[in-house]
Image (tube, helix red, strand yellow):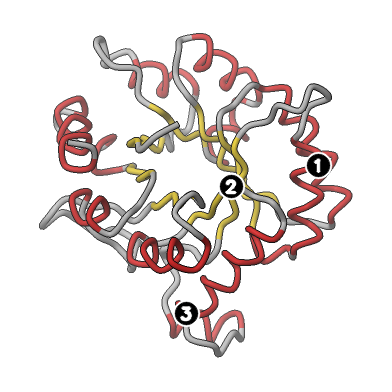
Amino acid sequence: MGKDVIIACDFASGEETLKFLDIFTEEKPFVKIGMELFYAEGPSIVREIKKRGHKIFLDLKLHDIPNTVKKAMSVLSNLDVDMCNVHAAGTIKMMEGALGGLTRPDGTRPLLIAVTQLTSTDQERMESDILIEKPLEEVVMAYAENAKKAGLDGVVCSPLESEKVHSVCGKGFLTVTPGIRFEGGDVGDQVRITTPAKAKEIGSDYIVVGRPITAAEDPVAAYRKCVAEFIG
């Protein structure tokens, strides 16, 4: 898969989600199903959206002991999603377990990426709340290197860190970047953000865009604007 815009479908119900997707009559956007929607609807919403022809990033951010994550990933591997993730803080061993569980008997699997630090986290919060005193960028790079050692395909990081991740882990190591806002748009609860055009410039492979599209007056136009700025 090449560069793409992933719409974060952070809705409370399947009905609301499918109603939203129905407005896209010409495109089949890549969509992200997160915890809110998955916990509300379960695997059935994944199957329904997949049946409609969308690529899916299942964003559940698994983080547990290696054996538990491995078993959970073996269940998720049956959902035919295109991408899923874990927390890099779970250690290399946990990520290796996730990869093993996700890989089907025929050797196929979805892309597997690891969350480094959430885009709502800044240096102050990282130090005061989770007692990590290293510079934030240094922490993100260390987590990215661990993900690569574990055999993962890439990481979730701020678009501001995408270029550095590629310099450390290689161009083929994917960067999936939330924290995308249009110029002058509401930043919400994000603190490490940039525009689609800037994300393209600094090398993000995928951008994840939620409210700037889902809450727009014309979501289709907002999606197309994202695609134009990020992909061209």
Position of residue 70 relative to residue 26, above or below, is below
Q: Mark 2 or 3, which is nearer the eye?
A: 2
On screen, residue 108 versus residue 21, left or right, reads right
The spot of residue 227 in percent (x, y) is 22, 34
Position of residue 21 relative to residue 63, above or below, is above
The C terminus lies in quadrant: top left
Q: Which residue is mark 1?
A: 100
Give the mark nearer the N terminus: 2 vs 1: 1
For badge 2, the amino acid type reads Asp
| Distance from the alpha carbon under mark 2 to that under mark 3 | 22 Å
Q: Secondary structure at mark 2?
A: loop
Residue placed farthest to the bottom in the image? Answer: 133
The N terminus lies in quadrant: top left
Q: Which residue is mark 3?
A: 136
Label 2–label 3 contact, CB within 8 A: no
Could you say which disc has been placed on residue 153 in the image? 2
Category of crowding for the residue at label 2, using alpha-carbon neighbours closer than 10 angstroms: few (below 14), some (14–19), many (at least 20): some
Q: Secondary structure at mark 3?
A: helix
For badge 1, the amino acid type reads Gly
| Distance from the alpha carbon under mark 3 to that under mark 1 | 29 Å
On screen, residue 93 versus residue 44, left or right, reads right
